[in-house]
Image: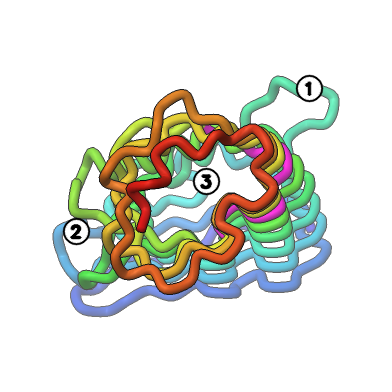
Amino acid sequence: GSGLGAATFTWIENVLIGADEIFGACRNLLETPKLHFTAFDLNSPSALINLRGTYTDCTKLTMTDMNTKHKIDVAGARVHCMGMFNGCISLTGPTDDPTYQNTIRWLADSLVNNASMMFRGCKEMVNTDCSYIVLAEYANQPVNVSMMFYECAKFKGNGVGNMFEESFARDRSTRFQTYNMAAHCVAFDSRFGSAIKLYGDCSKMFYNCYAFIGEGIAHWVMAEVTASSGMFNGCRSLKPSESLMPSWKMPLVLKANGMFSGCTLYDGVGTQYIF
């Protein structure tokens, strides 16, 4: 329930802190208790906080109190957020104010190396702003955002383009794994604007994103992509203002089944570069 106290974790060199699934399946949890992590050195390779599944399946948890920058204090650390809010079906802002923006402010000043399934199944999430999330590789592993917003049917993608842009601007060698990232996000229409590098299996990245226009995808770098099946399948609004550039060449791809299937507005300009 509400009214829980705070927990403080102090980092020791070469020791990874884990708070994974600390509130997993607490179905009566109404708010996020304060989690405070101290004494982190961002330049240390061991400065990693594991928040995997911290609030998974907390079905009554909302995000009305997540705007506070240090509600979860992870400043100065790398953070593993896989499945952090997975299955939090009530995660949303105040229902009486449709303009309310839930900002992920508590991730400011930290680096996220894994955000896969972070909001998977948060079907009521609408105006969450992801601009404060900065993605960064850890131990030379690509950033994993697979299924990050899977089945977030009302999510419009606020700040997702900025999340990628700011992350890539910080380190232009950063690679992103995006399998099923926004699949079934029927309202998703974030704009992208930089030559981000996708990596590995990018299948179904925007599967059934009916509203997705594809603005800003033209300059993406696809040389290390290995699969792209259904990447834009069902994106019936797909109509980027720029033609796909030569950077879309995907020499490693063996499977691209249905990549643009159902993209009824897309004219295919630039697809000659893909294969």
Tag 2 and tag 3, C-beta contact below 8 Å = no
Tag 1 and tag 3, C-beta contact below 8 Å = no
* 3D distance between C-alphas at marks 1 and 3: 22 Å
Residue at 30 percent of width and 53 percent of height: 249
Residue span colored magenta: 180-190
Which badge, 1 or 2, is on the more N-terminal residue? 2
Residue 140 spot, x, y in % from top left: 21, 70
Query: From what the image shows, is residue 67 above or below residue 274?
Result: above
Please identify, in this view, whether the residue under mark 1 or under mark 3 is nearer the observer.
1
Looking at the rendering, which quadrant does residue 166 occupy? top left
The local secondary structure at tag 1 comes to: loop
Residue 20 or 83: which is nearer the viewer?
A: 83
Q: Amino acid at mark 3?
A: Lys
The local secondary structure at tag 3 comes to: loop
* Residue 138 in view (yes/no): yes
In the rendered structure, find residue 97 and report the number of the disc placed on it: 1
Which badge, 1 or 3, is on the more N-terminal residue? 3
Principal secondary structure, stretch drawn in magenta? loop
Could you tell whether 28 is left or right of 246 in the image?
A: right
Tag 3 residue: 71
Tag 2 residue: 41
User: Badge 1: few (under 14), some or many (20 or more) residues near its Cα, within 10 Å?
Assistant: few
